[in-house]
Amino acid sequence: MRVMVLVKASKDSEAGVMPDPDVFAKMGAYNEELIKAGILLAAEGLQPTSKGLRMRFSGSERAITDGPFAETKELLAGFWLWQVKSFDEAVEWLKRAPFDGGTEIELRPVFEMEDFGELVTPERRERKDNLRAEFEKRPG
C-alpha cells in the first residue's frame, strides 16, 4: 500500500525560513533509513505559498489567486510518498520522524487501481500500465 505523508506548513516555512542545520541532518538520516528499508518513493519540500497560486475551476472559467495564503494551518510544507505493508507500519515509521515543536503531519492512503472496482476495465488497466512504463522510461 502507498501512503502520502503530508507535512503541514508553519509560520517559519511560509516565511521561507530554512531548517536548523541539526534538524536538516536528522531529516537526511531519517530519509536514508526510509530508502534503505525500501519505503521511500518520493520526498519533497515545498516553497512558501507566496511563490505559488491557486486556480479555481468553474465550468470553462479559470480564476487564479496568487499566494501567499492566509490559513497556515491548512497549508503544506512538504510530503513523502511511502510504500508500506500496512497503514500501521506507516504510523510506526512516522512516529520515528525527527519532528518536534508542534509539527502536524497528515497520513493518508493513496488510491490504488483495485480501489475503483469495476470502473477499471481491462482496457483502462492496460492503458495505465502503458503510461506508467512510458513515465518510468523518462530521463532524470
Image (cartoon, helix red, strand yellow):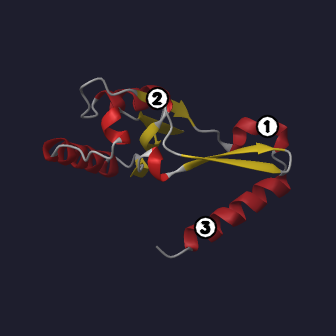
In the figure, is residue 13 to the left or right of 75? left
Percent position of residue 73, x then y: 45, 27
Residue 134 versus residue 13 in the image, above or below: below
**CA distance separating discs 2 and 1:** 26 Å
Q: Closer to us: mark 2 or mark 3?
A: 2
Other residues around mark 3 within 10 Å, as few (<14) / some (14–19) / many (≥20):
few
Amino acid type, callout 2: Glu
Residue at the spot of label 3: 135
Percent position of residue 97, x then y: 28, 34
Label ID, residue 106 = 2
Quarter of the image for residue 129 reads: bottom right
Percent position of residue 67, x then y: 52, 45
Percent position of residue 2, x then y: 53, 41
Q: How many marks?
A: 3
Residue at coordinates 51% horizontally, 37% vertically from top-left?
Answer: 69
Q: Closer to us: mark 3 or mark 1?
A: 3
Q: Quadrant of the N terminus?
A: top right
Residue at the spot of label 1: 117
**CA distance separating discs 2 and 3:** 27 Å
Amino acid type, callout 1: Gly
**CA distance separating discs 3 and 1:** 24 Å
Label ID, residue 95 = none
Amino acid type, callout 3: Phe
Q: Earlier in the sequence, mark 2 or mark 1?
A: 2
User: Of residues 10 and 38, which is closer to you in this image?
Assistant: 10
| Local secondary structure at mark 3 | helix
User: Do the numbered discs 3 and 1 sit on residues whose CB atoms are within 8 Å?
Assistant: no
